[in-house]
């Protein structure tokens, strides 16, 4: 809801300056990547303007127990804002799925640029692989970059960062049309 309000403010400000904003994009790193994808996928039909694309660097995207293992309960509790320790696995899964971007991808999802660290122990690269697989199943344009030698900071693979940044500029040119 706060992201929608921010987009509305941007659109209103631009309108006051005589600029008609018809498209937007979301992008973020880590938790910001999670929010970027969640908003772009869950609000694809609702924003004040069309989502041109979304981009995520190391964004948590799939909150399945298989992916998070021992961290599952703690992450689901923190993200939901409630103590889930007394809940069944099915109840926890239902709650966790409600904020997992991968579960909101549809055929109308915006093009997606994903980047994950191969040595990231905080947000495993399998998060991006889950999004990529779903995008491919639904024929949503997507790119997946694996920074093989990088942890969560994603600073070790300088050449991959340059490739990511070039792709991000390409996404802007392609999907914004300039």
Image (tube, rainbow, N blue to C red):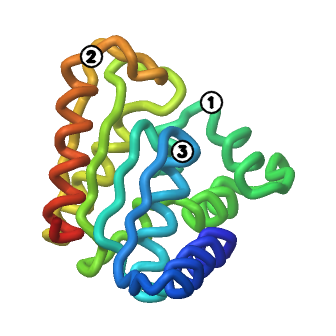
Q: CA distance from mark 3 to mark 1?
A: 8 Å
Q: Which residue position holds label 2?
A: 158
With 175 as the anchor, is 62 left or right in this view? right
User: Residue 119 or 32: which is nearer the viewer?
Assistant: 32
Q: Which mark is residue 65?
A: 3
Q: Position of residue 83 (x, y in %)?
A: 86, 51
Q: Position of residue 99 (x, y in %)?
A: 58, 62
User: Residue 21 or 107: which is nearer the viewer?
Assistant: 21
With 117 as the anchor, is 141 left or right in this view? left
Which residue does the image show at 47% across and 21% down from the upper left? 153
Q: Position of residue 166 (x, y in %)?
A: 18, 39
* Crowdedness near tag 2: few (<14), some (14–19) or many (≥20) residues, C-alpha within 10 Å: few
Q: CA distance from mark 3 to mark 2?
A: 32 Å
Q: CA distance from mark 1 to mark 2?
A: 32 Å
With 32 as the anchor, is 171 left or right in this view? left
* Crowdedness near tag 1: few (<14), some (14–19) or many (≥20) residues, C-alpha within 10 Å: few
Q: Earlier in the sequence, mark 1 or mark 2?
A: 1
Q: Are marks 3 and 1 in contact (CB under 8 Å)?
A: no
Q: Which mark is residue 70?
A: 1
Which residue does the image show at 55% across and 62% down from the upper left? 97
Instruction: Judge depth for marks 1 and 2 and give the one in front.
Output: 2
Work out which quarter of the rendered image holds the N terminus and state it. bottom right
Q: Earlier in the sequence, mark 3 or mark 2?
A: 3
Q: How many marks?
A: 3
Which residue does the image show at 22% across and 48% down from the upper left? 169
Determine whether the residue tagged by mark 2 lies in a helix, strand or loop. helix
Q: Furthest residue to the front? A: 17
With 175 as the anchor, is 11 left or right in this view? right
Instruction: Judge depth for marks 3 and 2 and give the one in front.
Output: 2
Which residue does the image show at 16% across and 63% down from the upper left? 141
């Amino acid at each position: 809801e706060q992201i929608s309000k921010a987009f509305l403010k941007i659109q209103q400000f631009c309108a006051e300056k005589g600029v008609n904003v018809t498209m937007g994009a979301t992008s973020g790193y880590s938790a910001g990547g999670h929010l970027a994808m969640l908003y772009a996928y869950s609000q694809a039909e609702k924003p004040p303007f069309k989502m041109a694309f979304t981009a995520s660097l190391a964004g948590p995207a799939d909150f399945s127990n298989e992916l998070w293992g021992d961290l599952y309960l703690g992450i689901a509790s923190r993200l939901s804002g409630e103590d889930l320790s007394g809940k069944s696995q099915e109840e926890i899964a239902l709650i966790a799925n409600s904020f997992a971007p991968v579960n909101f991808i549809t055929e109308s999802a915006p093009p997606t640029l994903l980047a994950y660290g191969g040595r990231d122990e905080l947000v495993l690269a399998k998060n991006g692989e889950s999004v990529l697989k779903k995008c491919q199943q639904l024929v949503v344009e997507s790119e997946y970059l694996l920074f093989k030698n990088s942890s969560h900071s994603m600073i070790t693979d300088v050449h991959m960062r340059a490739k990511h940044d070039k792709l991000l500029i390409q996404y802007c040119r392609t999907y914004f049309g300039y």
